[in-house]
């Protein structure tokens, strides 16, 4: 008997219908993109070849989808079995996040009709960071599907297959830890080749993969806290804040490592002065730092850490901090040179919003129909 | 073997792998018979004959501005403009080639980097550098349109046709792409051939660099016989007073150097050239990437360690406690 169960309830709830409307509006613009080209719906240009579709949908979206990664680390590598109840919902959220990140990458692709060229070994350029990101993300989507498959197999009573899958699942769990470590760090390495276009405060060259990996883990743990807290409220479930607060210690370690490394690297690269340049970039940097420090203050105190509300504030702050770090590096302070500027168009934003809406709708439907959330009595 | 010992061994092995593979890749060297162009901003009169012939040879329409069809009004590079002449203006813009209260012309086209970022970042090898000539070409048949070449180019040269549903990346291929092959046929690039003043000079990179260095040595005010066309076999010359060149050949060293080099009397940052530094960003990115992924040794070791640990921890999953 499974320790997870479908929570049931009405599928076409009010939040679902609102999300559906947003999704349908986005569909209209997606149709336009696939009939009249990227230029008809976006403000992308010769200097800003990557806009919110790449930076938000893929670079930040996949970090939001790192819950499965962060938990796999805790449960299976550091053997903290007590976090097991959180794994399945986190894996589902990761699967949806990555699948839609992949979809985002597809409609951003200028030559989408020959996307398969990246999967042909004869074409591979092993110097390319993008190759690593593309192949690794594709592989991880397959791994996440297999990691989530038990929920489906349980639902449809395919016990034979479930048993066989469980026997080899450990290989995929190991891959589920390795692959995000690889491509999440590579997302940072993408910035290296952009050279001078990336603002010096974010162009840390050799250190890019480390910062990207740390933000991925920080955001991964935060989204687990965020999901657990919101489903406690949204679905009227028992709060798991006791379990979540213990996670705080790990996050404190990650936050301290990130902040310390960030400042030491800037010092070694002689860029500390730029923090106080009082320009847009320095303001963004300071805002980012504040968002990283808020959760640190909350999580360092065991009293604050055990309060659900405080924990949620810490999680939201970290999600914003990690997103802002990536936004700043790739977009906000990105400067391709004179003559170029970028602000996303309404249709561009609507397409991104509709992808998020689709993701949330799928999550709502799947937790109601499949055994994803942990049974109450065990929680 | 205890898990702790195993983790230690894995970490040790990983560190050893990392140390033995972390050899920094330096900037690439110019191809043995690299061809290029030298753009002397002080010779350019802004006639845009080069822009026009470029469109003709590459089969691209002229850009019109406010319905005025005056040859070509392209303001910058785009999916239908591979070469453009831009104007620098300062103050009352009266004196040609003066930094203050002057104006001058600057060419924008692919610099054909010695260590090209676009080639390094392209996942599908759709950007290629010729091993002999150093010319960087684009091959849309394998391109997925990820546009990493655009963000990876220090000069924003590769341009995507955003207004086409089935668009592609365009860039200058030094008139040597399949079907045109002017350089292979012993001809020069279209823009160098039509340039009336020799502002755009074609030739072997070495000879062009020598010519540029020679111009730096000349005394301002003396008369120099400027070649037109191909520096190694000019079809004609013209005499002109030597301007006060800046002692800076753009592309001699910048980020590993470029095959298309510029000289000017106005500092290059004023002409919109980026602060690229000496080392190519591509060489740093590749050093990092190959330190981590050399022969996939590091990921393989990590996967072996992770599989072992996960296997152990899923076996006693039922009690869910610490081991």
Image (cartoon, coloured by chain):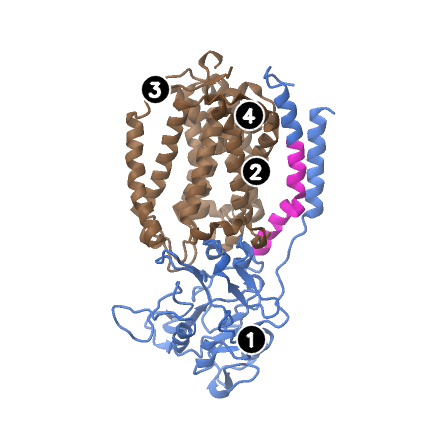
Chain colours: A brown, B blue
First-in-chain label (2 vs 4)? 4
Q: Provide residue A362's location: percent of width, then percent of height.
A: 39, 31
Residue A22 lies left or right of residue A297; in this view the side is left
Alpha-carbon distance for marks 1 and 2? 45 Å
Alpha-carbon distance for marks 4 and 1? 61 Å
Q: Which residue is mark 4?
A: A161
Co-location on one chain, circles 4 and 3: yes
Alpha-carbon distance for marks 2 and 4? 25 Å
Residue B178 lies in the magenta stretch: no
Main secondary structure type of the part rendered in magenta: helix
Q: Secondary structure at mark 4?
A: helix
Q: Give the residue at x 36% y 21%.
A: A234
- Residue that lies at the very extreme toward the top in this rendered image: A377
Co-location on one chain, circles 3 and 2: yes
The quarter holding residue B16 reads top right
Q: Which residues are magenta?
A: B282-306
Q: Which residue is mark 3?
A: A9
Camera-nearest residue between B96 and A272: B96
Co-location on one chain, circles 2 and 4: yes
Question: Which label was assigned to residue B184?
Answer: 1
Q: Which residue is mark 2?
A: A179
Alpha-carbon distance for marks 4 and 3? 28 Å
């Amino acid at each position: 008997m499974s320790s997870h169960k479908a929570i049931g309830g009405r599928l076409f709830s009010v939040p679902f219908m609102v999300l559906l409307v947003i999704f349908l509006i986005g569909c209209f613009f997606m149709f336009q993109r696939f009939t009249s080209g990227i230029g008809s719906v976006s403000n992308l240009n010769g200097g800003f070849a990557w806009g919110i579709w790449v930076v938000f949908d893929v670079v930040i979206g996949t970090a939001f989808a790192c819950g499965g990664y962060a938990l796999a680390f805790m449960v299976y590598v550091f053997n903290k079995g007590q976090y097991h109840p959180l794994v399945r919902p986190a894996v589902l959220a990761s699967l949806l996040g990555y699948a839609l990140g992949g979809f985002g990458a597809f409609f951003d692709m200028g030559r989408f009709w020959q996307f398969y060229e990246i999967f042909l070994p004869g074409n591979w350029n092993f110097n390319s960071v993008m190759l690593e990101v593309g192949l690794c993300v594709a592989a991880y989507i397959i791994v996440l599907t297999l990691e989530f498959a038990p929920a489906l197999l349980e639902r449809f009573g395919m016990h034979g297959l479930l048993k066989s899958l469980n026997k080899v699942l450990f290989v995929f769990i190991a891959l589920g830890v390795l692959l995000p470590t690889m491509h999440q760090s590579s997302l940072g390495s993408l910035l290296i080749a952009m050279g001078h276009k990336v603002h010096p405060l974010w162009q840390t060259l050799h250190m890019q993969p480390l910062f990207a990996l740390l933000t991925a883990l920080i955001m991964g743990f935060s989204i687990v806290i965020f999901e657990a807290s919101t489903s406690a409220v949204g679905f009227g479930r028992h709060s798991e804040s006791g379990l979540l607060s213990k996670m705080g210690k790990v996050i404190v370690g990650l936050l301290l490592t990130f902040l310390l490394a960030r400042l030491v690297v800037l010092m070694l690269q002689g860029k500390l002065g730029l923090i106080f340049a009082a320009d847009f970039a320095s303001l963004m940097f300071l805002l980012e730092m504040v968002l990283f420090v808020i959760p640190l203050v909350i999580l360092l105190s065991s009293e604050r850490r055990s309060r659900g509300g405080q924990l949620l504030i810490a999680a939201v702050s970290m999600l914003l901090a990690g997103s802002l770090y990536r936004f700043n590096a790739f977009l906000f302070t990105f400067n391709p040179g004179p003559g170029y500027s970028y602000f996303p168009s309404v249709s561009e934003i609507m397409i991104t919003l509709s992808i998020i809406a689709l993701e949330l709708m799928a999550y709502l439907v799947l937790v109601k129909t499949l055994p994803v959330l942990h049974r109450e009595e065990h929680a | 073997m205890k898990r702790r010992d195993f983790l230690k061994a894995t970490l040790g092995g990983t560190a050893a792998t990392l140390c033995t593979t972390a050899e920094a890749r330096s900037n690439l060297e110019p191809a043995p018979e690299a061809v290029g162009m030298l753009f002397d901003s002080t010779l350019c009169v802004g006639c845009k004959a080069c822009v026009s012939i470029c469109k003709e040879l590459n089969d691209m329409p002229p850009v019109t501005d406010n319905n005025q069809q005056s040859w070509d009004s392209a303001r910058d590079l785009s999916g239908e403009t591979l070469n453009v002449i831009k104007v620098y203006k300062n103050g009352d813009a009266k004196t040609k080639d003066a930094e203050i209260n002057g104006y001058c012309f600057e060419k924008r086209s692919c610099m054909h980097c010695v260590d090209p970022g676009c080639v390094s970042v392209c996942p599908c090898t759709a950007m290629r550098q010729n091993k002999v000539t150093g010319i960087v070409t684009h091959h849309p048949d394998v391109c997925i349109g990820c546009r990493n070449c655009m963000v990876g180019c220090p000069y924003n040269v590769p341009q995507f046709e955003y207004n086409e549903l089935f668009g592609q990346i365009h860039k200058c291929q030094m008139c040597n792409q399949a079907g045109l092959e002017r350089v292979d046929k012993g001809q020069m690039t279209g823009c160098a051939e039509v340039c009336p003043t020799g502002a755009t000079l074609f030739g072997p990179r070495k000879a062009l660099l020598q010519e540029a260095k020679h111009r730096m040595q000349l005394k301002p005010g003396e008369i120099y016989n400027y070649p037109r066309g191909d520096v190694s076999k000019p079809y004609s010359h013209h005499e002109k007073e030597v301007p006060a060149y800046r002692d800076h050949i753009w592309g001699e060293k910048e980020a590993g150097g470029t095959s298309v080099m510029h000289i000017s009397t106005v500092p290059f940052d004023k002409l919109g050239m980026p602060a690229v530094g000496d080392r190519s960003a591509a060489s740093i990115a590749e050093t990092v990437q190959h330190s981590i992924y050399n022969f996939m040794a590091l990921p393989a070791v990590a996967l072996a360690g992770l599989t072992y640990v996960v296997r152990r921890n899923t076996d006693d999953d039922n009690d869910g406690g610490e081991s």
